Image (spheres, rainbow, N blue to C red):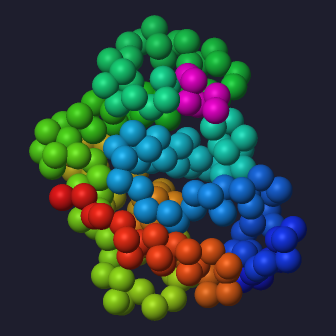
Amino acid sequence: MNDTMIGPDGQPRCGWCAGAPEFIDYHDKEWGIPVGDDRRLFEKLSLEAFQSGLSWRTILAKRENFRAAFHHFDIDRVARFSEDDVQRLLLDAGIVRHRGKIEAVINNAQRARELIDEAGSLAAFFWCYEPDPEQLTAPQSASTSSESVALSKALKKRGWKFVGPTTVYAFMQAMGLINDHVAGCVLRGTVNAARKTFQRPT
């Protein structure tokens, strides 16, 4: 895949935007912009878990259905889901009907509540794994990093599921813990500026 593609406005963007028309809007408005909201962080990590073995295009197309099915990823509500909810979700054709992944999201909501008690917020915990920006002079070409491996291990140790290093790395890219917009992308500077003004949660 080329490093960049030319968007409908004539501006270069990350090459993966060529994969589907809807990727451009997601890329321009969300991908890489730093996030400190626990619900949004939980949603994204949950959707990355559902993506495992699938394409992001599949998940993005169903994102509103996932939000409806999981009460907009309200951590407390999802943590209280029962077997009846699992059965309801297994019958929901609007989402990915995979029992293991559904049960993982419910489990992870329960673990998230514990982590919030431990660290104060999910954001405070996740942002502790932000790489040193001074050491990131260019976007990464790999699908994992030492930080994503460390965060994956920390979450697994606390009982989270479907949080392997690749899944966590994609989460870190999307939530702005790193800026992986390629050097020629029109959004790289915008994301750099957003990261400079972002107040890291503590």
Q: Position of residue 114 (x, y in %)?
A: 18, 37
* Left or right of residue 121, residue 181 in this image: right
Residue 186 position by quadrant: bottom right
Q: Position of residue 105 (x, y in %)?
A: 42, 33
- Say above or below: 85 vs 174: above
For the C terminus, give its image quadrant.
bottom left
Q: What is the chief secondary structure element of the magenta stretch? A: helix
Q: Is residue 65 visible?
A: yes
Q: Does the magenta run of residues contain 68?
A: yes
* Left or right of residue 153, residue 163 in this image: right
Front residue (pair 70, 158): 70
Q: Is residue 166 visible?
A: no
* Left or right of residue 170, residue 184 in this image: right
Which residue lies most toward the left here?
A: 118
For the N terminus, give its image quadrant.
bottom right
The structure residue drawn at horizontal position 36% and vertical position 21%, both measured from the top left corner, is: 77
Residue 153 position by quadrant: bottom left
Q: Which residues are magenta?
A: 64-69
The structure residue drawn at horizontal position 58% and vertical position 78%, both measured from the top left corner, is: 188
Q: Position of residue 55 (x, y in %)?
A: 68, 52
Q: Position of residue 142 (x, y in %)?
A: 53, 78
- Say above or below: 175 vs 106: below
Q: Does the magenta run of residues contain 45?
A: no
The structure residue drawn at horizontal position 42% and vertical position 86%, both measured from the top left corner, is: 136
The structure residue drawn at horizontal position 48% and vertical position 78%, both measured from the top left corner, is: 192
